[in-house]
Amino acid sequence: MVGNQNCGKTTLFNQLTGANQHVGNFPGVTVDRKDGAIKGYPNSVVTDLPGIYSLSPYTAEEVVSRRFILEERPSAIINIVDATCIERNLYLTMQLMELGIPMVLALNMMDEIKNNHGSVRINEMEALLGIPVIPISAMRNEGVDEVIRHAVHVARYQEGPLRHDYCSPDENGGAVHRCLHAIMHFIEDHAQRAGLPIRFAASKLIEGDPLVVKALSLSQNEQETVEHILCQMEEERGLDRQAAIATMRFDFINNICSRTVVRPGDTREYLRSQAVDKVLTGKWTALPSFIAIMAVVFWLTFDGIGGWLQGQMETGVEWFTGLTDTFLSSINIAPAIHSLVIDGIYGGVGTVIVFLPLILLLFFFLSMMEDSGYMARIAFVMDRPLRKLGLSGRSIVPLLMGFGCSVPSVMSSRTLPSVRDRRLTIMLTPFMSCTAKIPIYAFFAAAFFPDNAALVMGSLYVMGIVVGILVALLMKHSMFRGEAVPFVLELPNYRMPVPSNVLRLLWDKASDFLRRAFTVIFLASMVIWFLQTFTFHLKMVAPGMEHESMLAQMAGVLQPVFSPLGLGDWRIITSLASGLLAKEVVVSTLSTLFAGVPLSEVFTTATAYAMMVFCLLYTPCIAAMATIRRELGNTWAMIILVFQCAIAWLAAFLVTLIL
Amino acid sequence: MTLAELKIGQTATILSVGGEGGLRQHFLDMGVLPGVPITLVKYAPMGDPMELRVHGYELTLRRADARKIEVRRTENGKRKTENFEENGKQPFTFPISDSRFPEPEHPGLGEGGHYHQQQEKARRETENLIN
């Protein structure tokens, strides 16, 4: 499946496969390819590729799409075209047709066209393009079966496009046509050897695409001949080569559209978007509304709805623990197992699981912002301020998603077109406090700051942002000199998020969280309980002699590092170390280790705050580190790992000095 | 004049697209081409980047890049749009009764479109020949 960014590919993919893919209304949500089988055709594989505007790749994710099409040679292409913006979308179609791979064209958002009194003569367009054209509405699941039938048909019988050639001898004197065909014949043998479709190779050679130029490996003499042909064409056409090719494609598209498309005036969706944008991107209202929206989101998550839901969960978990406790006592089970279940497993997993509602709510709001199209506006509004930090407006998306979870956030940084921007953005992402850290803050806030819990939580989020800004400024003047890349972004019309898409995302996140709770956190809780209950001689620790346990002995090694922060207690060090598995584990470990012991024995309010600050800033969890390594390589992952620990230590140290 | 000198609401025709390499190709691929009309919709709150309307969609880019794009003002700056619900006129659609352009049904359309008819016809002709 190939198409422009934000044309509904992933929505159609969900309809085709019934899979759980995340769909958003921000250009570039799909950052890696996703595979699935078509409903009713279990032997088929359909691949959802990142959106591209052209086969000349501009960002890293666009490279994924192009490489897939050229190297894996799919047996057919489903080209999705946003009918509300048909010219720009057909530009990609032109280039796909050059490849000679069987394809069908799915004309999406036809409902929007029809509702606004527009129309497309499908049969005529089919004849002109030489490929099946199917009007659909992916959102409403209309025409999807037809896309499947046609796609399977052209793939099975290998019916290629009937037309590869759309330059015309009478278009603007025919200079481009003559040039293109001359070069096609001239490089035919090279293209065959390189395994590239001839027409595609010729037009990319004219555009000067470095990858194609290299693959063709023309001799010096041949290169010069091509250059001569091109110079002649540029002179006759009066345009440079890239513009001449692009104009030729758009001329053909305009020709087709003038014969087949009745364009609606300004669609209702467009006018609505403009009205909403008067406020949301207006000169004086944009920043206040951004701050207001974020404030409402956080308030609803942590206080409004989230707080209430969390209370319900707590009551439930307590009731269940009490039930098990009575049951275990009544059957006179061995004290070691009783302690394992109640202190180890329930204490660990139970403490974390009550935060599920908060985490889901935050993801819900973030996905609403993305699906509705507001995220693209935030990038538009925040470009100027972010440029002062050496970033571009596009970086705001990974950063905001960082408040949800660092893993998808780091992956979404692929939409940034330069390596420099990506490194810097990924480096800052972990400072945006992720949902997994919420349990930590809530745990300490409830114990030490019961009266101003909200204030403490807020201060931590703000501190994360402030540290991020400081680090960005530092980097801008040291490691990451230079300008952020140009900012070119499409602003899609606002759309109502599709409930099923949002529900799918929430289900994904919930099952992901629960899986983690019952694997990583569950195991970590048991291991911690074991290490803490037994000495190195495998004897159960006697009451009052806890410092002899295996855990205490091991954690003692790190004591000199954490003592200056007031966090030198072995139990605290262990919880921080186990937090590398997943941040929620910090809390589960603490509650396992401090079962029956008041926290105030080792924490003062100052050290509790220092602890939260350290947790906010230190190295992200294993999953996030693995993603960072995949995106940036070993060296950068190591740099980030060490760097974050250092920053966290410094910040926590400053806190202990001040408080 | 360049695109950056345009005032809000004004429409101009692109004369040439400057710059080089990947970014220029990206502009061309997004439909920012010589001869194409482009409208300045608004500026972001801090005066940069700018929101433009081209080929019926909204594109944002920075002023620094807009300075590389040469344009010429077109006469009527504002596009006229018709609101069919207010003025009571009927929007133009293809006459359904015209046998030359039958209004295709949807969904179920594309099936039986020219494409497969032609394929089928070719196959039948070949079969006839063989027989």
Image (cartoon, rainbow, N blue to C red):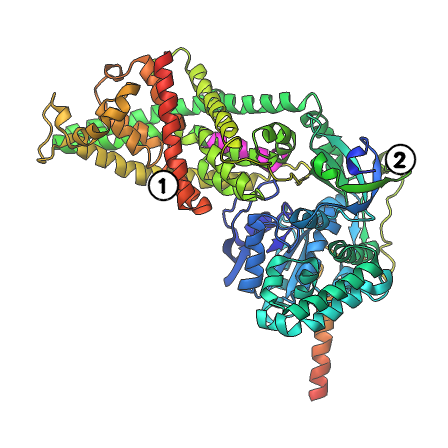
Q: Nearer the viewer, residue A430 or A507?
A: A430
Q: Nearer the viewer, mark 1 or mark 2?
A: 1
Please give the chain letter of the residue carrying mark 2.
Answer: B
Mark 2 crowd level (few <14, some 14–19, many ≥20, 10 Å Cα): few
Residue B117 visible: yes
Residue linked to disc 1: A515
On the image, the x and y values in percent for residue A405 come to 45, 35
- SS class, disc 1: helix
Q: Quadrant of the N terminus of chain A?
A: bottom right
Kind of residue at disc 1: Arg
Q: For this view, does A107 lie left or right of residue A302?
A: right
Q: For this view, does A255 lie left or right of residue A442?
A: right
**Which labelled disc corresponds to residue B87?**
2
- SS class, disc 2: helix
Q: Nearer the viewer, residue A324 or A378?
A: A378
Majority secondary structure of the magenta segment? helix
Extent of the magenta region: A360-375
